[in-house]
Image (cartoon, rainbow, N blue to C red):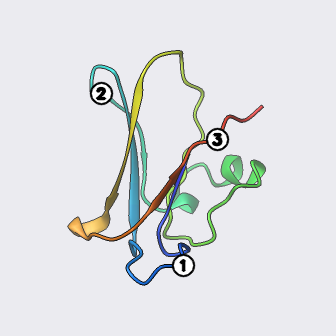
């Protein structure tokens, strides 16, 4: 999963997005602010690293079931973001 903000080519792009993933009970499964801070090697190995260091990404293996991914702005900022979820093999 990744959330793009600064690399989205629109004038009101979210400058510093955060990404959080929750399970069906509302428990936090994983969260990331800047993709290089956590799991950098795993994310680079996917060849889907975000273009900006300010964009979050998470590599997860999830059990079957419903999950919610939430993209928000650091310090309650707003703007346009693109959330992407990939199935990796």
76 displayed left or right of 59: left
Which quadrant of the figure has residue 27?
top left
**Quarter where residue 1 is shown:** top right
Tag 3 residue: 86
In terms of depth relative to the viewer, which is nearer, 53 or 14? 14
Looking at this rendering, what residue extends furthest in the bottom direction? 11
Q: Earlier in the sequence, mark 2 or mark 1?
A: 1
Q: Is residue 87 above or below residue 46?
A: above
| Residue ID for mark 2 | 27
Sequence-wise, which precedes: disc 2 or disc 3? Answer: 2
The image shows residue 42 at horizontal and vertical percentages of 69, 46
How many numbered circles are shown?
3
Mark 1 packing: few (<14 Cα in 10 Å), some, or many (20+)?
A: few
Q: Which residue is mark 1?
A: 9
Q: Is residue 47 above or below residue 76?
A: above
Residue 50: x %, y % from top left: 62, 63
Callout 2: helix, strand or loop?
loop
């Amino acid at each position: 999963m990744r959330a793009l903000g600064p690399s989205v080519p629109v004038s009101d792009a979210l400058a510093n997005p955060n990404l959080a993933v929750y399970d069906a009970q509302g428990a936090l499964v994983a969260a990331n602010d800047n993709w290089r801070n956590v799991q950098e090697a795993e994310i680079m190995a996917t060849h889907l690293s975000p273009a900006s260091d300010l964009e979050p990404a998470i590599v997860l293996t999830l059990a079957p079931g419903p999950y919610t991914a939430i993209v928000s702005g650091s310090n309650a900022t707003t703007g346009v973001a693109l959330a992407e979820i990939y199935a990796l093999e």
